Image (spheres, rainbow, N blue to C red):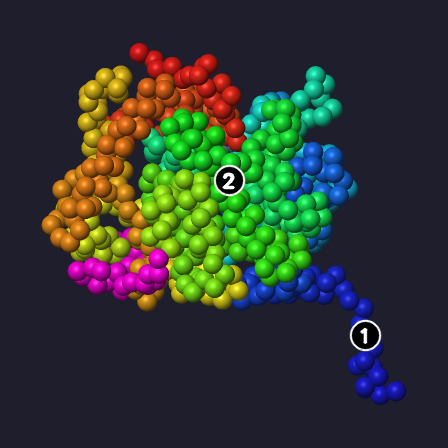
Amino acid sequence: MGIIAMAAKPRAPTAADAEKKARALRKARSELYAARQHLGLATQEDLDLRIPFDVYFQDPCVTASRPEYNFDEEFTVPWEPGLADGPTSARFAVVDYDGGTEVLNSPARWDRDLGKFVDSQGKVLDRANLGSPQFRQMNVWATLQNALDFFENGFGLGRRIEWGFEGNRLIVVPHAGYGENAYYDRDSKSLQFYYFDPDADTTRRVHTCLSADIINHEFGHAVLDGIRPHYHESVFVETAAFHEFLGDLSAILIAFRNNAFRAQVARATGGDLDRENPLSGLAEEFGKNVGDQPYLRSALNELKYAAVRNDQRHHYRSQVLTGAMFDIIRRLTAYYVTERKDSVQEAFWNTIRRMQCMAVQPLDLLPPVDVTFEDYALAVLRAEQIVNPADPDGYRGMMIDVFVDRGILSKERGDVLKKPATVFQRLDVDVFHDPLSIAASRANAYRFLDDNRRKLFIPFAADVVVTDLSLAQKLTIAGRRQPRQVLLQYIWREDVLLEGERFGRFAGETTSMLCGGTLALDVDGNRLAWARKPGAMPLIEGPRADEEAAAGIARRAAFLDALAARIGAGRVGDGVPGGAAGLLEKAIAPVTSRTVDGTVRFELSPHIGIRSDEDEEMGERPWSISS
Ligand SMILES: [Zn+2]
């Protein structure tokens, strides 16, 4: 027996050793977290940088009627260092004050050692423990963490996003009270999920916070309000409809990204998405119980733009664009199955991978104000052209056909877009600024704009403001890095006098029309996109200034017409009564007015719900104008 044998004999680990080891593991995890952008998804899961949760991936109604649509074994959300009770994370804080019972439910607790959320008794919140409010808190939070990642990761926007209000934590209220709706509400910085009983007794209570479709729809509103906050101040029905579109699209794409769900849809449809299916039907449980139909809205529709262009109902109107994007999903899947001989499951996987890039990345190219369906179609086509200029599969042509068929793009426009053209052009300005120097600060970006008012068609008299500036690192569908993008949004206001009876009680008042643009450059100075909303103030003389000025004058006329139509339809209310969180949409007109610095501003209701009464009752109970 010598020294060697003695050294080999293990010492029993003490509690201090265990604590030391746990500390080292936590430190290692934080270091890995800092480097996570260099790790693949599977590696992140192996290293516990993504943690599994049991969440409903459609809604409990789908789960009950078709048991095969169950929890997803592979559902994970990104781990982050600051997880805490609530759940609370960097961007979300669940606050479970039940507005119906006026009770504050105790929060789900984060058990750091287990790496899971537990209820008040310390029992893990998973599919074996579904009944408690804490499960619902965890369900809505985990669904949101996953949805945020969907938008922020490199296949999406490739950058962090801000909210449309001051603050970094979106408050999530899973039991906001009794009612048949769910809201994103900018004023209270919250998502609010209501619950209701479809029967007289309470045995079948429907919790909107358990429906992935509803959660992802409302979150779509929060994302859009974060990246384009001035859409809120629009008198155009189409801009409100775009908000609804993005909500519905989020629900569809996030559901489709879910592995288990996709496998089930494949088995149920055999790859034929032209039939009604769980993917195209939005919010099934909600639709069945509220609307006596199998879903709330369907992406499988034949609506054309001409049929909705003068319709004041924004939920209804949104279906044209949702339908168009679903047409693209259907055509992609069919192409992969018939041309590439993919299995149905492979075809679905290839479809959703491509759709995330195709549908989410263009959001960064949209104008800062008054977005239209056409703006989005053009952004989608441009984003595709940037990453796939040769387009051997003909994706752009297919998408142009879809948009033209729906009437979102004119036939003439479609023909022009199909012609070969130079893909990358340098930005034509008088005074060059390095893109990374523009990206360094809003003050820098402003000097770039001011130095180039003439070429950028910014009126000399306009007090132009940089409203957003970011640097994005997007990926191609193959996971390769695109050149970094500098994304600059700027706006200015133009006073517009409301003359004539068609403006009702607002006649004689002054309002402001928002103008501006979004400029997307890559770091090499290529102009990726430049979406503009011109105004009617005089421009500095220069090439194409006349054309831009004419577009600005036409835009002001369209603005006045849209506002007059809103007022004429009785859709403009006085403001937000009470202003308390949890007010039902019934209390608020679709457009509100308030006076700022002597001019009237028209804004969308701060509550944006999953449905609105107007969809069924329009005409019977219009919003009345108080005199
Ligand atoms: Zn909505």
Label 2 and label 1: CA atoms lie apart by 67 Å
Q: Which residue is mark 2?
A: 323
Q: Is residue 145 left or right of residue 454?
A: right
Q: Which residue is mark 1?
A: 10
Q: Which residues are magenta?
A: 419-443
Give yes or no for residue 442 being in the magenta stretch. Answer: yes
Q: Is residue 414 visible?
A: yes
Residue at coordinates 19% horizontally, 54% vertically from top-left?
455
Which tag, 2 or 1, sits closer to the chain's start?
A: 1
Q: Is residue 34 left or right of residue 426?
A: right
- Asked if residue 586 is positioned above or below residue 96 in the image, the reply reads above
Q: Which amino acid lies under the numbered mark 2 shown in the image of this protein? A: Gly
SS state under label 1: loop
- Asked if residue 235 is positioned above or below residue 360 in the image, the reply reads above
Badge 1 local density, few (<14 within 10 Å), some, or many (20+)? few
Badge 2 local density, few (<14 within 10 Å), some, or many (20+)? many
